[in-house]
């Protein structure tokens, strides 16, 4: 199925399908956001005025089946920006077909093109299926996240 997957930047016409996917992603993490946050996030991801906040979608036969959002930011230990892969989601119907890998690899390629040598992300400990993929294409670090 993944041979028919197109990975491309998010565009304004994706809004309805993107929102459905992002909602499912947020629900997986038992979270939600306001309509104002949906609107602002989508606008930022599509805006040429926000070059450090970007996203890709995975499309199959005209339907969106996955998304990834990523953010470039400065880092005190590097001269270059680093890339934070913030959200990654594949519809359950396409999991295990390579969609998640293709989305991550698209971020890797974009970061390389844009001069960001480091890509990192966080996930929940219980996200075991996704972690099987992450363990194959990235290095698990020993860091623990704290939040206010």
Image: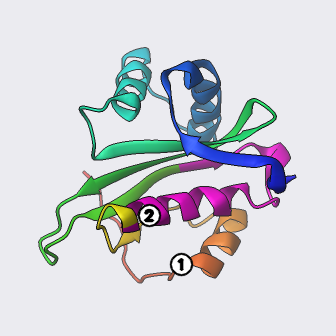
The percent position of residue 99, horizontal first and vertical second, equals 72, 55
Magenta region, residue range: 88-112
Query: Which residue in the structure is indicated by mark 1?
Result: 138
The percent position of residue 124, horizontal first and vertical second, equals 54, 61
Q: Residue at x 57, y 64 (%)?
A: 105
Viewer-nearest residue: 30 or 80: 80
Q: Residue at x 76, y 29 (%)?
A: 62
Query: Which residue in the structure is indicated by mark 2?
Result: 121
Marks 1 and 2 in Cβ contact (< 8 Å): yes
Based on the picture, tell me whether residue 25 belongs to the magenta stretch: no
Based on the picture, tell me whether residue 92 belongs to the magenta stretch: yes
Sequence-first tag of 1 and 2 = 2
The percent position of residue 126, horizontal first and vertical second, equals 63, 63
Q: Is residue 26 left or right of residue 5?
A: left
Viewer-nearest residue: 70 or 124: 70
Could you tell me what secondary structure mostly forms the magenta stretch?
A: helix
């Amino acid at each position: 199925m993944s041979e028919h997957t197109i990975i491309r930047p998010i565009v304004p016409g994706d809004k309805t399908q993107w929102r459905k996917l992002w909602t499912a992603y947020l629900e997986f993490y038992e979270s939600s956001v306001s309509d104002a946050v949906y609107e602002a996030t989508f606008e930022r991801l599509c805006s040429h005025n926000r070059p450090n906040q970007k996203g890709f979608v995975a499309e199959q036969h005209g339907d969106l089946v996955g998304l990834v959002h990523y953010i470039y930011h400065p880092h005190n230990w590097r001269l270059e920006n680093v890339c934070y892969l913030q959200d990654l989601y594949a519809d359950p119907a396409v999991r295990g077909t390579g969609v998640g890998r293709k989305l991550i690899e698209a971020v890797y390629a974009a970061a390389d093109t844009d001069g960001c040598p480091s890509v990192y992300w966080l996930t929940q400990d219980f996200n075991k299926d996704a972690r099987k993929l992450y363990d194959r294409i990235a290095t698990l670090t020993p860091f623990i996240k704290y939040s206010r």
